Image (cartoon, rainbow, N blue to C red):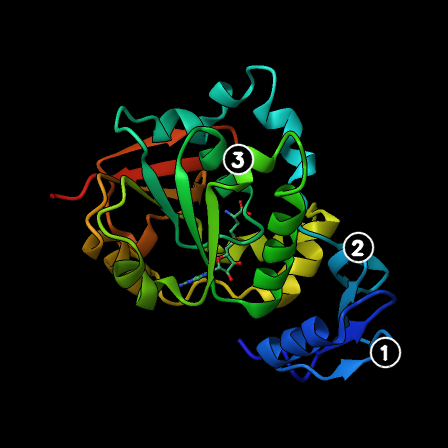
Amino acid sequence: MDHGSELVVCMGSGAQREAAEALARRTGAPLTDAAGDGLTLLIDKSGVSLTGGGLSLRGDFEQMLHRISDGRLSHEMLVKIAKTKTPHPVAVDATAGLGEDSLLLAAAGYEVVMFERDAVIAALLRDALRRAKKHPALREIAARMRLIEGNSVELISSAVSQPELIYLDPMFPSRRKSGLIGKKLQLIQKLEQPCADEEELLNAALNAKPAKIIIKRPLKGGFLAGRKPNYSVKGKAIRYDCVLPQR
Ligand SMILES: C[S@@+](CC[C@H](N)C(=O)[O-])C[C@H]1O[C@@H](n2cnc3c(N)ncnc32)[C@H](O)[C@@H]1O
């Protein structure tokens, strides 16, 4: 997605010019040395963050530590549903966002290939992954996570062969309407578009022939691309629809 008209890439203190220029090229935004009036992707010595309207957002796996440590990981709904006996399982997260669900899958033992097509979100995720790889409690998990920047609809089949699991969490239109969204979502929603290619996304996942496709939906949301899953698991606010493709 081209963010050029509303976004600037700002080179802050301690940033390497080459990295800042690469970020500007990828996002199609101009490189500046001051924050813009709209959204600013700031690169400085501590990494990459997105700022705008008084808010600031970084990809941050450290804030996920409480969900993956001290026996709590096995209580995560996604982890329960993704459980497998396959040794060295591979998962594809075809809509990675800031990679939080991917982290849960990687913590549960999956090698996770993440696809993110939005250049700004991919930059935040890449930076979060870089920091996680240096963190003592996250290093080993992050080593199982790989990011491919691009459209999973076009790339899944050539990048991964017969993964155990494909995970889909495309943005659902009604998420935009909630009055209770946190600051993370407020900034992210300036970038994310509601999914307009549900059918293509589901077909790409089916064509890759995983053992299971897990689709995250709002509790009362419709099925992705209208396809009835084999079964669903409901939580308080969300639902996971599971499709078991014929292999
Ligand atoms: C709701 S967010 C995912 C949040 C994620 N599950 C997490 O735990 O952080 C959806 C993301 O999928 C990305 N996306 C949607 N369709 C995609 C596609 N076909 N290929 C790659 N990324 C896609 C969007 O840019 C957005 O960042």
Is residue 4 left or right of 234 when viewed as pictured?
Answer: right
Element on which disc 2 rests: loop
Q: CA distance from mark 2 to mark 3?
A: 21 Å
Residue on which the image places disc 2: 46
Residue type marked 2 = Ser
Q: Which mark is residue 33?
A: 1
Residue 52: horizontal and vertical position, in percent?
79, 65
Of badges 1 and 3, nearer the viewer stands: 3
Tell which residue pokes out farthest to the left in this image.
247
Ligand 1 within 8 Å of the CB at mark 2: no
- Nearest to N terminus: mark 1 or mark 3: 1
The answer to whether residue 5 is above or below residue 85 is below
Residue at the farthest top position: 71
Quadrant for the C terminus in the image: top left
Q: Is 115 on the left or on the right of 99, as rendered?
A: left
Residue 10 in which image quadrant: bottom right
Up the image or down, 51 lies above or below 183; here it is below
Which residue has dot 3 on it? 141
Pointer 3 local density, CA inside 10 Å: few below 14, some 14–19, many at least 20 = many
Q: Earlier in the sequence, mark 1 or mark 2?
A: 1
Q: Residue at x 82, y 77 (%)?
A: 36
Identified by mark 1, the residue type is Asp
Residue 158 image label: none
Locate residue 139: give its quadrant.
top right
Looking at the picture, tell me which residue is in the foreground, 160 or 104.
160
